[in-house]
Image (cartoon, coloured by chain):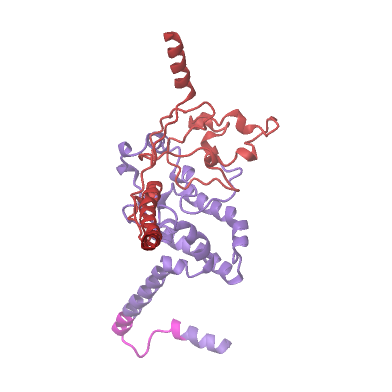
Amino acid sequence: MKNILLIGWRTLTRPSGYYSLGALVIGGFIAGIIFWGGFNTALEVTNTEKFCISCHEMENNVYEELKTTIHFTNRSGVRATCPDCHVPHNWTDKIARKMKASKEVWGAIFGTINTREKFLVQRKRLAQHEWERLKANDSLECRNCHNFDYMDFTEQSERAAYQHSTALASGEKTCIDCHKGIAHELPDMKGVEGW
Amino acid sequence: MKKINLAVIASLLMLAIAPMMFSLNASAADKNTVNSLATLRDSTPIDRQKEPNSIPKVVNKDIKQGRNYPMQPPVIPHTTRSYEVNLNNNKCMSCHSRHRTEKSQAPMVSVTHYMDRDGNFLADVSPRRYFCNQCHITQLDAEPLVENTFTDMHSLMKEKTATTEQH
């Protein structure tokens, strides 16, 4: 075993004796394209709703709840899918989120929330993770579609216009502070600010 | 003898025709009464499906509406779409409860909501008054399906004093 590793290391550290520099550079370039392309494709596949709800934990709980909300069906037919709100669009943030999400693979394998009852017990903790994330990034995933600069207060109801033009405009509050539970059912809100 | 025969034939004929006439009348009457009751179906035959009416919009003006009688639960002047009122939360109370009204400037639920049925005041909304939309409802921008002749006590009293003053 040690010998095999040693041979491998020597091959890597010694200059190439048989292949031209051109072949190595071009070969490396092509291999790089294939590797990066494959990586990106795999990443995009895990960033689709179909992938998310391939786990019954997601399909039977959160996806079912989303179906009744305005983010699933509405007058203009614009739809938010799971990654639109739960995965940052920015590359570095996205990779960070994806690495964190590897914990979810663990959960899926060992059935952390594989029944409705288990899910309901964990719901508050899970919801709080999302609220914290959105609070920390100033509701970035909301703002990917709902741009404050283009909000027409005259089209909003009086109450909404008032809150948006004061608390939201001044940056005192962010979307998630008031709009909790807009896409999924709420956990027990005892002790949550504003309830 | 012949006359009796004729009479028998005539009465038999009557007996045969009467139910037919009756059934004709009855079906016509049925149609009228059935259709006058089935207001939502607009005289659509029973074996057919009516084109559904468009769903009216919820009034969202935030302006208090009058009450028709003193004990009437006030109606909700705003939309309550996806407001959860269940075991876990009561979305209404995040504006209308005592400790939230200062921030929200919404009317506080009346003190009777904090009383149990023996009249004792509780720290929070009484369980029997917890489900807001059992009594309070949003209003739709729609014509009433049936005429309503309700007259409130005030106008009745006004009328009465007016007539007594005349005499």
Query: Where does the image place residue A10, in percent across and percent down from the top left?
Result: 48, 85
* Whether residue B158 is situated above or below residue B19 in the rendered picture: above
At horizontal 55% and vertical 65% (from top left) the residue drawn is A103
Residue A119, picture quadrant: bottom right
Residue A177 at what x, y percent from top left? Answer: 48, 43
**Chain letter for red?**
B
Residue A12 position within the rendered picture, expressed as x and y whole percent measured from the top left: 44, 82
In the image, what residue occupies the spot 34% across and 43% down? A148
Which of the two residues, A179 or A110, is positioned nearer the viewer here? Answer: A179
Is residue A26 something that shows in the picture? yes
Quarter occupied by the N terminus of chain A: bottom right
- Looking at the rendering, the stretch of residues picked out in magenta corresponds to A11-27
**Closer to the camera in the image, B153 or A171:** B153
On screen, residue A104 versus residue B63, left or right, reads: right
Q: Which residue is found at the position 40% from the left and 37% from the top?
A: A160
* Residue A114 vertical position relative to residue B21 in the rendered view, above or below: below
Quadrant of residue A120 within the rendered picture? bottom right
Q: Is residue A12 magenta?
A: yes
Position above or below: A38 against B146: below
Q: Which residue is drawn at 56% across and 69% down?
A: A108
Along the viewing direction, whichever of A96 and B42 lies nearer the viewer? B42
Instruction: Give the chain coloured purple.
Output: A
Residue B32 part of the magenta-drawn span: no
Task: List x then y, in percent, for residue A3.
Answer: 56, 89
